Amino acid sequence: MSPAVQAAKRWYWQRISAMAMALFVTVHLIVMILAIRGGLTAAEILGRTRGSLAWGAFYGIFVVLVAVHGAIGLRNMLAETGRLSERALSGISLAAGAVLLVMGLRAVAAVTLGGGA
């Protein structure tokens, strides 16, 4: 695959992930504002998210979007500011995406499944 096609695919995925994240951030903020205005404490919120497949799926998808978006964004920033090879850029961005994914999914598991993640 040519570098131009790869760049176009990265552009596409970063834009799609940004659009989807905008929806997820909006829902997250609305739910948090309603919960806090409703007088729920952090412990009560966690009590409601424990065992919830819906919240686990929502935040799991959110984490995947963040990992994709963040990894591509980091790659773009490094490409514009550094003199790294394509191989180094790909390796760094994949590693960053993997770290974001693992950390995010651990947080989702802690909030929805309970216990230490």
Image (spheres, rainbow, N blue to C red):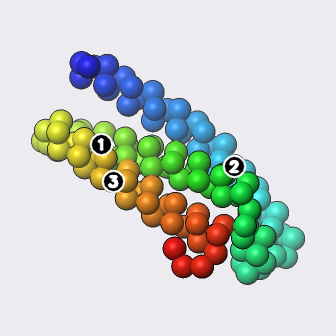
Q: Amino acid at mark 1?
A: Arg
Residue at screen point 22% across, 42% down: 89
The disc placed on residue 26 is 2
Which part of the image, by quadrant, shows the N terminus?
Answer: top left
Residue 9, given in percent of the width and then of the height, sits at 39, 25
Picture coordinates of residue 3, whole percent (x, y): 24, 23
Identified at 83% across, 69% down, the residue is 37
Identify the element where label 3 is drawn: helix
| Tag 3 residue | 96
Rendered view: 10 above or below 78: above
Q: Mark 1 vs mark 3: which is more N-terminal?
A: 1
**Along the viewing direction, whichever of 105 and 89 lies nearer the viewer:** 105
| Real-space CA distance between mark 3 and mark 2, rounded to the nearest whole angstrom | 25 Å
Under circle 2, the secondary element is helix
Q: State whether residue 11 is above or below residue 47.
A: above
Q: Which residue is mark 1?
A: 75
Question: For residue 29, what is the image quadrant?
Answer: bottom right
- Residue drawn at (66%, 51%), measured in percent from left and top? 58
